[in-house]
Image: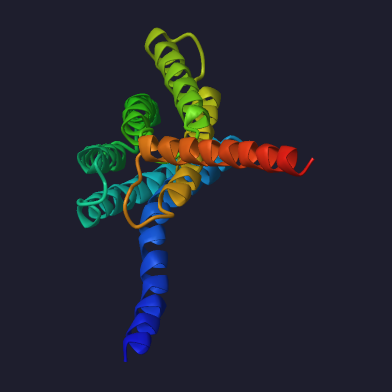
Amino acid sequence: MKLKAIKKSKVQSIPKFMIEKLRFNSIFFVSGLLFNITWCISLLITHAIEFYIVGLSAFLLIINGGCEIFFALANKRKLEAWGLFIQSGIFTIITGVLILFDLVNIVNVNEVLLSYFFIAGFFNLILAGSLVQYGMIDWSRFKNLNWVVILLSASALLMLVSDCGDADILLGITSVLFGCGRMVLTANFSELNTFSDKVSREIYEKIDGVKIEYFEALEKNWDADRNLFL
């Protein structure tokens, strides 16, 4: 009976693990694909079609923000930075609503999107800072991409305010990089969600230290045994 219970628990753990992983990944894939696809297309077409693309982007932003809030509430116990996810989700929904209500004026829409990228870049940096203590994941690529997003969005906003030129190209590049950053975040979350509970970096370092000491002890014992037989 015990063996059957163990087998059942193992079978049930696999779909549960996949559901948890999908919760981590789906939100960021939606956001990354949104900004990569829509704005890559908008760079190659006329401004007449840009109206519909921006509207679609705004609608997906609202959905994305709602999913992010749901994800934060569903993983409240496991995710230390769940409050940041809720704030980011609310901010994303507000951005989408503002864009939907101001589609006629594309210039204002660009300012709203650039402001979103600028603030969301800082949100992502804070998020990475709160998660860097867990696991042995390299967050440098994600941080560097967000710093570039912040700098580009700030430059594009200055161009719009001072009327120095067309900021559409910078906006497109910024959105593509922001989407790439979201995909890097997805990959990092896939690694972080290997365990059901978060394992701190300190524990990993202790495990590595024990491994090093163990192999050093094996080498010493091997040398001692070899000297005895020689």
For the point 44% across and 54% down, which residue is it? 194
Q: Is residue 104 above or below residue 143?
A: below
Q: Taking 205 as reference, is 120 left or right?
A: left
Depth order, front residue of 76/137: 137
Q: Residue at x 39, y 55 (%)?
A: 195
Instruction: Count all numbered tags in the image, as a single digit.
Output: 0
Q: Is residue 113 above or below residue 33?
A: above
Q: Position of residue 154 (x, y in %)?
A: 41, 16
- Res. 83 image quadrant: top left
Q: Give left or right: position of 180 versus 54.
A: right
Is 201 or 33 nearer to us in this picture? 201
Front residue of 77/226: it is 226
Farthest residue to the right: give it: 230
When the figure is inspected, residue 177 is found, relative to residue 70, above or below; the finding is above
Work out which quarter of the rendered image holds the C terminus and state it: top right
Q: Residue furthest bottom?
A: 1
- Residue 147 pos. (x, y %): 45, 21
Q: Position of residue 189 (x, y in %)?
A: 43, 47
Q: Is residue 179 visible?
A: no
Q: In the displayed structure, does residue 161 sit left or right of residue 42?
A: left
According to the image, what is the colour scheme of the structure? rainbow
* Residue 163 against residue 204 in the figure, above or below: above
Q: Would you say residue 203 is visible in this rendering? A: yes
Instruction: For the N terminus, give its image quadrant.
Output: bottom left
- The quarter of the displayed image where residue 74 is located: bottom left
